[in-house]
Image (cartoon, rainbow, N blue to C red):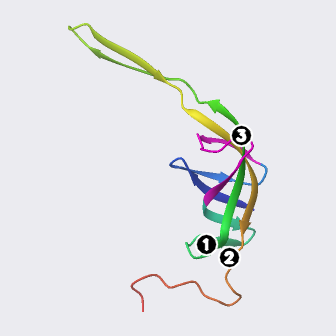
């Protein structure tokens, strides 16, 4: 079973027990976080629509914090002695995926909603 989650403006494919670095979360070390699933795949069943994902959830636990890679940048204007350099290191939270649950499933024989505009 795996899921695609959204966190920090990015999407990540995760499975239970996996550790990943995401943008800094407002949760204490050891605290649990609820992540928004965009897709949940369990064998042959795929949950992808908002109605199907209403009961789905992905839980993670914050296991640490780190700094991302150093990014260096600068500006330069010729003939005027204008130079400026700066750097940045993004703060990251390391999370471990604890559980993926996809409880909203289609009933047997029930068809998916037809696309809008079709009769």
Residues in magenta, as a range: 18-36
Q: Which residue is mark 2?
A: 104
Q: Would you call the spot at circle 2 few (<14 residues within 10 Å), some (14-19), or many (20 or more)?
A: few
Q: Quadrant of residue 47?
A: bottom right
Pick whichever of labels 1 and 2 is earlier in the sequence: 1
What residue appears at the point 73 percent right and 61 percent down from the top-left corner? 100
User: In the rendering, which numbered label is found on residue 54?
Assistant: 1
Viewer-nearest of discs 3 and 1: 3
Q: Give the farthest residue toward the left.
A: 79
Q: Quadrant of residue 52?
A: bottom right
Q: Number of labelled discs?
A: 3
In this rendering, the answer to whether 5 lies above or below 103 is above
Q: Give the farthest residue toward the front.
A: 28
Q: Assess whether residue 35 is covered by the magenta stretch.
A: yes
Q: Quadrant of residue 53?
A: bottom right
Element under disc 2: loop
- Residue 42: percent from left, percent from top: 74, 67
Q: Give the farthest residue toward the right.
A: 17
User: In the rendering, which numbered label is found on residue 100?
Assistant: none
Q: Is residue 10 left or right of residue 27?
A: left
- Residue 25: percent from left, percent from top: 60, 43
Q: Is there CB contact under 8 Å for labels 2 and 3?
A: no
Q: Would you call the spot at circle 1 few (<14 residues within 10 Å), some (14-19), or many (20 or more)?
A: few
What residue appears at the point 73 percent right and 54 percent down from the top-left corner? 15
Q: Nearer the viewer, residue 84 or 39?
A: 84
Q: Is there CB contact under 8 Å for labels 3 and 1?
A: no
Element under disc 3: loop
Element under disc 1: helix
What residue appears at the point 67 percent right and 82 percent down from the top-left corner? 106
User: In the rendering, which numbered label is found on residue 29?
Assistant: 3
């Amino acid at each position: 079973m795996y899921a695609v989650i959204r966190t920090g403006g990015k999407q990540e494919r995760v499975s239970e027990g996996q550790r990943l670095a995401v943008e800094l979360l407002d949760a204490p070390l050891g605290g649990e976080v609820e992540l928004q699933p965009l897709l949940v795949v369990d064998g042959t069943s795929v949950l992808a629509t908002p109605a199907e994902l209403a009961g789905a959830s992905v839980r993670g636990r914050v296991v640490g914090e780190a700094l991302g890679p150093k990014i260096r940048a600068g500006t330069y204007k010729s003939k005027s002695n204008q130079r400026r350099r700066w750097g940045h290191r993004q703060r990251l939270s390391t999370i471990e995926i604890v559980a993926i649950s996809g409880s909203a499933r289609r009933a047997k024989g029930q068809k998916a909603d037809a696309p809008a505009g079709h009769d």
